[in-house]
Image: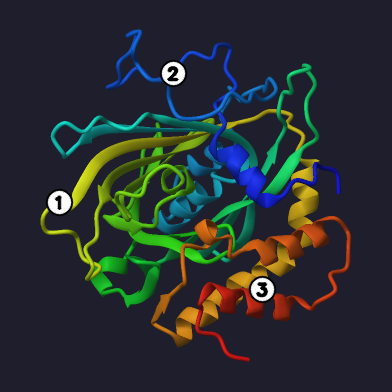
Amino acid sequence: MTGMKTPFILILSLFACSAWAAQTNSPRYTFSWQLGQESAPAPRGGTTRGPHLDLETEPSASWKALQEPRLSAQERDRRAILAMAGDYQVNFDFLEIETFQPGTARDKPYQSWGTERVYVDADNGTYISLVHILDMRILRDDGQLSEPIVTKHWRQSWQYEPREIVEYKGQNRWERRKLSSAERTGQWAQTVYQVDESPRYASVGRWNHTSSFSTWSSGDTWRPLPRREWTARSDYQVLEGTNRHTITATGWLQEENNLKLVLGANGQADPVQPYRAREYGVARYSRIRGGDFQAADEYYQRTRSFWTTVLTDWHELFQSHPSVTLRAQVDQAGLFKNLFEYADQLAGGQTPSQPADIVIHDSLLDMGAPVTK
């Protein structure tokens, strides 16, 4: 495989602690921050930089397909979801806008970046699954670019008029919930999966389309803490918020409006101080022209069957167990390690010594999933 062989933990750390490659290292925030003050703390993040990229300035083919007249509502929705596939420069900005404890300072803003190719992994008209593969090159101190750093990132799957979803309930527990007719008619569920294909969060919402943009908005959703938070915070347990996906002519946005929720011993919101703070977040996906994603293609093709099997096992697990509690959040405990080592062997053209089903079964057991032989 063409690419840098880097331990996955190191890749995630690099990704989580990188600052966007800009012409200047000055903070980019201009909203609700101490802009221009000498004592203002710098945003969280590192100083790594990436190569210059040519961004798309003309409407994409997928945007033009989305704008075609006389499409059914479901087909227009489907095309909006498919428009998220492609090659992107991604930059992530999160800003804590308010705290709810007097005298407590707002946390530093968070900034990171990445380049990734988003693949259409499945599409049958009512179910679409998109897989994100990171393919990054770092500008080194000597002015040279690193070899491509490649790994699987996240998956988002979309189901039209779903009968049920798997929701996060806090304390490393997920539950399957059936939806009423009113909740599902004409709507799409988005399920976001963690790096090991375990469910992260899910919600239902409706697409709305204009000639300027198409947008989908979720309901209020509980989510586990992302890496950018649990590596720096331990004073709250759940992100409670909404997602909005907006498709534009040259890319798309994922906007988040999150409350930082404290849980009591009973797994419910702490009655004394339920919320620590509110944050806004934007993940901006800007289309790239002429990017080199050969390494991502090789990784995706060589590992696709394996990750599909892992995803299928998670689906079957939740069909047989309406509630699943894991030992810990998988990325915090490194419980996905064996799965990624297996995938890296496949990506490198090697034949792993153990069958995939044994590796998957043992990994799920390690996570605390209720699987049997």
Left or right, 359 with respect to 189, comes to: right
Which tag is nearer the camera, tag 1 or tag 2?
Answer: 1
Task: Name which of mark 2 and mark 3 comes first in the sequence.
Answer: 2
The amino acid beneath tag 2 is Arg
Tell me if residue 156 can be seen.
Answer: no
Residue 227 image position (x, y, % from top left):
48, 47
| Identity of the residue drawn at 32% across and 36% down | 280
Instruction: Measure the alpha-carbon separation of dots 1 and 2.
Output: 32 Å
**Circle number at residue 226:** none
Left or right, 147 with respect to 128, comes to: right
Instruction: Measure the alpha-carbon separation of dots 2 and 3.
Output: 41 Å
Where is 321 relative to 296, above or below? below
Q: Residues within 10 Å of mark 2 (few under 14, many from 20)?
A: few
The amino acid beneath tag 1 is Gln
Which structural element holds mark 3?
A: helix
Residue at the spot of label 2: 28
Residue 177 image position (x, y, % from top left):
33, 75
Q: Which of the pair 85/154 is nearer the observer?
A: 154
Q: Which of the pair 49/303 is nearer the observer?
A: 49
Instruction: Measure the alpha-carbon separation of dots 3 and 1.
Output: 42 Å
Residue at the spot of label 1: 273
| Identity of the residue drawn at 64% across and 40% down | 116
Left or right, 264 with respect to 184, comes to: left
Task: Name which of mark 3 and mark 1 comes first in the sequence.
Answer: 1
Where is 8 relative to 287, above or below? below
Which structural element holds mark 2?
A: loop
| Identity of the residue drawn at 60% across and 35% down | 114
**Circle number at residue 309:** 3
| Image quadrant where residue 184 sits | bottom left
Tell me if residue 356 can be seen.
Answer: yes
